[in-house]
Image: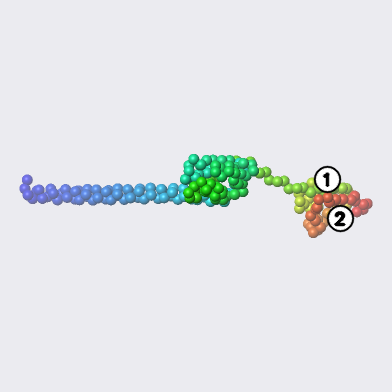
Amino acid sequence: MSNTEQAIGKLTFFPLYLFTSMVLVFYTDIKNGLKQVFFIMIRLALSGVFAVCMFFIATVASAQSSYRVQQGDILTIEVLEDPELSRSTVVLPDGNFSFPYAGTLRAGGRTVSQIESSIRGAISSNFANPPTVFVSVQPAEREPEEPEEPEMIKIYMLGEVGTPGLVELEPGSTILHAIAMAGGPSRFAATKRIQLRRTDSRGRQSVSTLNYKAMSQGAGLRQDVILKDGDVILVPERRLFE
């Protein structure tokens, strides 16, 4: 093969060689770049987990610092200078607990930091330097308190209503509420002259005449007074041609 043919052969394979080299370089750059992206993602993930953990720890610490200990709670006490003193103890019904070298201490109604200070002061005479005391609290499981039912007021319904007699209403109820709870006025009721009889603390009785018909139609709502315990509502019978 002549020199000319050899030169032509080299020129023929040169573009393929050049293309292959470029592909390898490009692939190497992409591979390195992906590795960097992967490591960055791992760092971000770890930093996010760390941030969440720190937030959780800070939240728990804040809740512990403001919580007021109650009876039945479990206190976990650690004394760094003497691990044998570290223990868990239950707050007694009287709000106290016992601890070595300290005797009986108060915990009920106190915060964790106050209890730590109390223990430290009580046992410090047994150490060359004030000991390092850590206290954590596990609140006792308590049944949720049932909401208190409002104290009812007693109203007495007389006369032409569906069900005369005692009616129990929530505080703040009005005459319209009371008459509705009593079944409403009967067809013989004189709805324009209903009486509200009220006795004050001195035993003096007052009588007010109210227009139920106007109140029920929205024209006399100012007359729909708020009832008090012991009020008597009299719905009289309608007169002839009334």
> Residue 27 vs residue 168: left or right?
left
Q: Identify residue for label 2.
A: 202
For mark 1, give the secondary structure.
Answer: strand
CB under 8 Å between discs 2 and 1: no
User: Identity of the amino acid at label 2?
Assistant: Arg
- Residue picked out by circle 1: 166
The residue sitting at 85% across, 45% down in the picture is 164
Left or right side of 13 for 127? right
Nearer to me, 82 or 40: 82
Place of residue 232 in the rendered image (x, y in percent of width and height, measured from the top left): 85, 50
**Separation of disc 2 and disc 1 at Cα?**
23 Å
Mark identifier at residue 183 = none
Q: Quadrant of the C terminus?
A: bottom right
Q: Work out whether residue 215 or residue 54 is closer to the camera in this orientation and state it.
A: 54
Say few, some or many: other residues with alpha carbon within 10 Å of mark 1 (under 14 / 14 to 19 / 20 or more). Answer: some
First of labels 2, 1 by sequence position: 1
Residue at 12%, 48% in the rendered image? 9
Residue at image coords 59%, 49% = 110
- Residue at 36% x, 50% y is 40
For mark 2, does the 10 Å Cα neighbourhood hold few (<14), some (14 to 19), or many (20 or more) residues? few
| Residue 65 as seen in the image, left or right of residue 151 | left
- Residue 27 seen from this side: yes
Give the percent coordinates (x, y) of residue 189. Answer: 87, 50
Percent across and percent down for residue 112 are 55, 48
